[in-house]
Amino acid sequence: MSFVEVKGSWDPKFQPVVAAFKANFDPQSTTPEQGAGFSLFHQGKLVVDIHAGSYTQSGASAPWQQDTLVNVFSTTKGVAALCVAHLVEKGLLHYGDRVAEYWPEFAANGKQDMTLAQVLSHQSGLNAFDLPITVEDLLDWDVCCKRLAAQTPFFPPGSRTCYQAVTFGFLVGEIVRRVSGVSLGEYLNKEICQPNNIDFHIGLPESQHGRVADLLPPTRAPYMPKNMPAHALKGMTNPLLRADFMLTSQARQAELPAINGHGTATSIASLYELYRPENGLLSSSTLAKTTEVNSTRTDDLLGLPVHWAMGLVVNALANTYGKEPTTFGHSGWGGSFGCHDPANGLSIGYVCSQMSPDLVGDARSQSLIEQAYACIDK
């Protein structure tokens, strides 16, 4: 067992969660932690807010702090979905709207009837860039959006489901920009994070880079389903995204609403608390629309029957986020995740620097979720 010191605060009732968090630092575990944070709200109260280990930046090591930031890859998508839900709450967007109503150029090549709901539930057929693109190209927002607006979908929208690993951010972000007049990162900061004192960023100012933990790449490549369709494979290889791309100052400052959110465990859990109607950001009716499942078919890239709502994974039969079928959230490459369980009033955030190779089902997060439910069931 590791002798790592767990810092932070917790309700004694949730001591087993703290023990599970500490156990993840054991060198003999599947993916030993190097530095991590975990936060849990229960019925509106922050009952676990812990961190441990250390982080590395530019070869130097420092103790993991309460405000240590880390890139959370696709956990960012659940935050982007909250921005869209907030615009729906304001009446500025509707999930059934055609994308071209707000983004006229998008109507090209058979996309004139594609809806916002199809984009958010990964049914757009724009899961990848068709023409070759480099990781450096991803830093040019206008170029990426113009390419997607001109592109022909790989399949008729709504006919299949294929995870939009990178393109999701440009599609959703440009819709937000067209409607609100500001980028998704700016909207998140001004409308959601600042008013609620939440430390999460899509497009991290250079002044904050000193507290970012470097991601440590996984020790092996992620498992990928056999016989993956060509369009799904293209989503993983065009461009071939490496974890070390996110270590550059340019990538940290860029707005990539699918893959480069930077936050803490506390900030992620706090954002999922805002999905609760009790907290005033969204009404019950908006939450119901946001969490309505729009696709249950097997995802072409993930190889699993994912229940996709409006930018969120609904637990349903997958049990990704515990036992409740109505729990919803999003995970990121490497292990981070955020989720909310409306039935039990739970909101959870988890971040780590040592990446796991698993795209779905990180053992560390699963152990923390299991203990959280064991504690509330006592």
Image (spheres, rainbow, N blue to C red):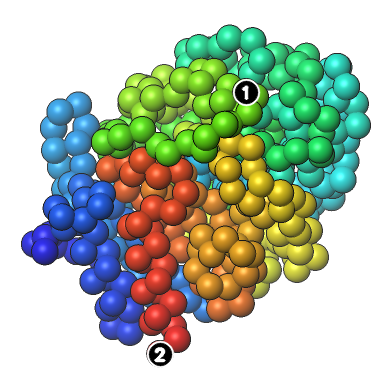
Check disc 1 and report its element: helix, strand or loop.
helix
Q: Position of residue 199 (x, y in %)?
A: 44, 48
Badge 2: few (under 14), some or many (20 or more) residues near its Cα, within 10 Å?
few
Can the viewer see residue 243 in this picture? Answer: yes
Q: Are marks 1 and 2 in contact (CB under 8 Å)?
A: no
Residue drawn at 72 percent across, 14 percent down: 146
Q: Which residue appears farthest toward the top when viewing the image?
A: 132
Image mark for residue 378: 2
Residue drawn at 35 percent across, 57 percent down: 363
Q: Which residue appears farthest toward the left when viewing the image?
A: 3
Residue drawn at 68 percent across, 68 percent down: 277
Q: Is residue 234 above or below residue 81?
A: above
Q: Position of residue 338 (x, y in %)?
A: 49, 56
Q: Which residue appears farthest toward the bottom when viewing the image?
A: 378
The amino acid sitting under disc 2 is Lys
Badge 1: few (under 14), some or many (20 or more) residues near its Cα, within 10 Å?
few
Check disc 2 and report its element: helix, strand or loop.
loop
The amino acid sitting under disc 1 is Ala
| 189 to the left or right of 73 | right
Residue drawn at 56 percent across, 56 percent down: 329
Q: Position of residue 163 (x, y in %)?
A: 62, 37
| 145 to the left or right of 113 | left
Q: In whole angstroms, how far apart are the C-alphas of marks 1 and 2?
A: 48 Å
The residue that label 1 is drawn on is 230
Q: Position of residue 247 (x, y in %)?
A: 33, 26
Image mark for residue 170: none
| 62 to the left or right of 216 | left
Quadrant of residue 241 within the rendered picture:
top left
Q: Is residue 209 above or below residue 136?
A: below
Q: Which mark is nearer the camera, 1 or 2?
A: 1
Can the viewer see residue 268 in this picture? Answer: no
Q: Earlier in the sequence, mark 1 or mark 2?
A: 1
